[in-house]
Amino acid sequence: MRQGIDWEMDGVLTLLSFGPQGWSDDIAAGVVVTVTLALATLPLGLVMGFLIALGKRSEDAALRLAANIYTTIFRGLPELLTLFLVFYGAQIGVQQVMRFMGAATGIEINAFAAGMVALGAVFSSYASEVFLSAFRAIPNGQYEGAYAIGLSRWRTMRLVILPQLIRLALPGLSNLWLILLKETALVSVIGLSDILRQTGIAARVTKEAFLFFGIACLIYLVLALLSSIVLSAIERRVSASGVTR
Amino acid sequence: MSLSDATREARELPPPAQGAGWTHARLTGVALLVVWALLGLGIVLFLLASWDPDLFWRYAPNYASGLWVTIQLVVISVVAGAVLSVPVALGRRSKSRIVATLSYAYVYFFRGTPLLAQTFLVYYGLGSFRPELQAVGLWGFFREAWYCAIFAFSLNTAAYQAEILRGAVESVGRGQWEAASALGLSRLQTVYKIILPQAALVALRPYGNEIILMIKGSAIVAIITVYDLMGETRRAYSRTFDFQTYIWAALIYLSMVEMLRLGVDRIERRLTRHLRR
């Protein structure tokens, strides 16, 4: 360290270094966990959301009802409660099954998997609404035109509808991604070492709570900023390739 | 009925509607509904099987007080946030660069970071400034988890509400302002009589969603030792290890959110009755 720097500043820099005294390596590990969890949840949520949107616009009343029950539940429950329900519920369920099969108990549910399932369920129920409104924005003539030139239902969906759907749904999905990124903070409660948990440990050990939770907030802001840069680049690209209506 | 009557009737009536048959969609739909029904039945059976009047009467008062804490938290934060959102929204529209940037930074910070991190920053973080806070006499306020939660939640929802307010006011066309001033209405009159009634229509649904988000988000105060509905649930679970404690909480939260959603739907139908044909 350079001579003449204020002692306190020096202390802060040591705390933020990558060494054994510093916390940056721990926090960086937390960033990796947060980003990995969000990235792992995304495809799950997108696929589920798309399927639920298909269910909601089905002609069959039973399918519509089943899809609506799903979104009512996962949009109505607090995310934290959903997480606990999945985490403890799965634990109890597995234990029951194991006891039923006569095996020894003591299986731990992976916090990462529980977080993925809970956040994916919430994400998919919001994503289904985004997909649904995107579907509504595609005129019927697109389907009719595709059927008229002899495309099957599946190929119509893949070649005609999906490319337009993605373009229409992208702004809404970008928003959901930013929300998902913030919601991953909840998994720190069930013991996953994400950004918030790592900074929380640092705050407890060093008694510099404001510094470390401030850093946590800044990291989330940077992640949001990076995401919006990437997302707007994708949006520009996708909208450039499409026709203007 | 004679035979000729029957044949004539058969000729005149359209053919009976064909049953749709068991399409893939119906098969999937019914199968999924059966899954939901089994799940619901399972939960009901589970609650019945683990029904314990002792447990219920021991924890029902706790749940009621937790629910009351949740409602208080949400109402106070939403009202305080609504008050705070007005200057922020005005700042966003301000012509002054500095004011506009500051209010944008405020909104960006609170919308870009997790509510949980903000709550930690206030509850644990402000403890770092204990001497300073004691000097200005605010330590008593920031020592309590409850006040910290209200503080963090109000600031958070103010940022979201400011954006709702701004969007709603901007959705009212410029012509409305110009026409009002042409009629000689003052600025205050214009806002109250012309702009707000139109903006309220646009803002109603987002406001309803924001309150729902606050109800759901308020569950995290349980982590900083406020005994709201979630906090009481966690306490009950940690004492009994009975999963039904969480199911009760889920049912209460679900019915709260659904009631609010139906209420907003109703108000919206009432407010937009002049737009329907």
Image: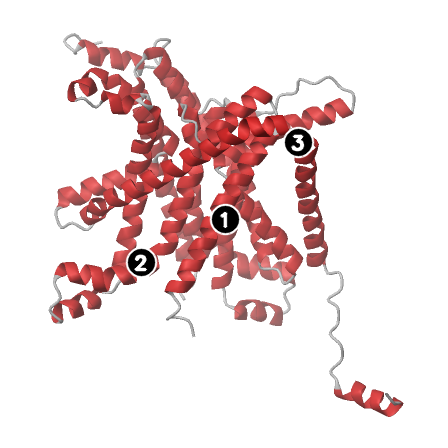
- Look at the numbered discs 3 and 1 and tell me whether their residues touch, using CB distance below 8 Å: no
What's under tag 3, amino acid-wise? Answer: Trp
- Residue on which the image places disc 1: B258
x and y percent of residue A124 in the render? 53, 45
Chain on which label 1 sits? B
Chain on which label 3 sits? B
Mark 3 or mark 2: whose residue is earlier in sequence: 3
Query: Quadrant of the rendered structure where residue A93 is?
Result: top right
Do the residues marked 3 and 1 share a common chain?
yes
Q: Residue furthest bottom?
A: B4
Looking at the image, residue B22 lies above or below residue B254: below
x and y percent of residue B62 in the render? 49, 29
What's under tag 2, amino acid-wise? Answer: Ala
- Residue on which the image places disc 2: B200
Depth-wise, is mark 3 or mark 1 nearer the camera? 3
Q: CA distance from mark 3 to mark 1?
A: 25 Å
- Residue on which the image places disc 3: B51
Q: Give neighbour class at mark 2: few <14, some 14-19, many 20+ (Cα, 10 Å).
A: some
Do the residues marked 3 and 2 share a common chain?
yes
The residue drawn where x is 16% and y is 68% is B180
Q: Tag 2, which secondary structure? A: helix
The numbered dot on residue A213 is none
Q: Tag 1, which secondary structure? A: helix
The residue drawn where x is 57% and y is 67% is A143
